[in-house]
Image: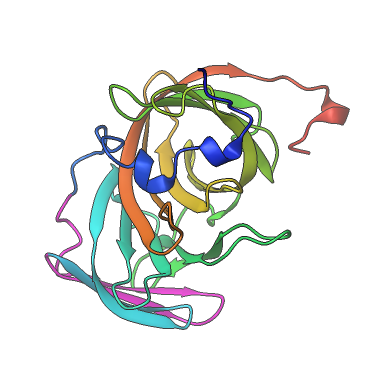
Amino acid sequence: MSLNLLDTSNWLPLDGLAPGFDANKAPTVPDLAGKQFTVIGDGGPMTFSFDDEEVTWAAAGRSGTSAYEAFLVAEELYYAQWHSPVESEVAVSLILDLANGRALYIGALLGRATAGATAVEHDFRPGTLQGFATSGDAIVESTGLIGRRVEWVYSPVHAYEHVYLSPTWYTWQCLAGPERGLADTDSNTVFKIRPGIFVFTWREKVIPCGSVTIADHRDIGAIRSHGSLFGWNEAGTEPVHFTFGAHGRLVSVSQHSPELDPAS
């Protein structure tokens, strides 16, 4: 009997997706070890001190020490990710652009979905790096992905496509893997970090999870992303958090009439 794809109770829970999903994750790098960063922005300074394995942080009214993973996105541009061992409903992403003296803190808070809110909420706090010369544009929300359709391969068996619709919405479809045939439209938020490099975040409404990714779109035939997923397990009792990576390819770009352009 074929699976009823319209019955969302059949959809794979986050802990069911995890095995093998991280096959295309990039190697982590030790470059941040021994360094401390202070981010100046709205809400006061935030501090992050890295050693070989752990980060100690104080940001957005929260603090702690946690194991972390760091990925090199581009020259002097890093993505660090960790899950609080004390507040299990909190995960943190930190983008550090050392070349331009800028940073973006993203706090993910896991709660319970309601009629007006997804289970994961994201707290975005861009700022500048104390002690670094600033250059380039400030990190701000962006419409730069709108209209693009991108094919993403996460592993030899996991592939999805994303269609970036508007500042609020994107559509995903599973092309290969255990969720093949499933699709939905969920909320997203995008920030431009550098020309051609974007932070893309999403928050799903069916599966209680959210994601923070950063992707280098400068070569549209060889897009590279790094990310994390955070949400509840199938029973809804324990948080699930893991990192992943993907190789992408631009499939097409929608061309709207200027007066109907959703990016306007």
On screen, residue 118 above or below 26: below
x and y percentages locating residue 234 in the rendered image: 43, 51
Q: Residue at x 52, y 36 (%)?
A: 10
Say which quarter of the image contains residue 58.
Answer: bottom left
Is 14 situated left or right of 167 in this image?
A: left
x and y percentages locating residue 243 in the rendered image: 31, 48
Say which quarter of the image contains residue 51.
Answer: bottom left
On screen, residue 146 above or below 74: above
Judge whether residue 174 is colored magenta.
Answer: no
Q: How many tags in the picture?
A: 0
x and y percentages locating residue 132 in the rendered image: 35, 67
Judge whether residue 32 is colored magenta.
Answer: yes
**Chain part drawn in magenta:** 29-52
Q: Quadrant of the C terminus?
A: top right
x and y percentages locating residue 107 in the rendered image: 47, 66
Q: Outermost residue, right direction? A: 259
Q: Residue at x 14, y 65 (%)?
A: 53
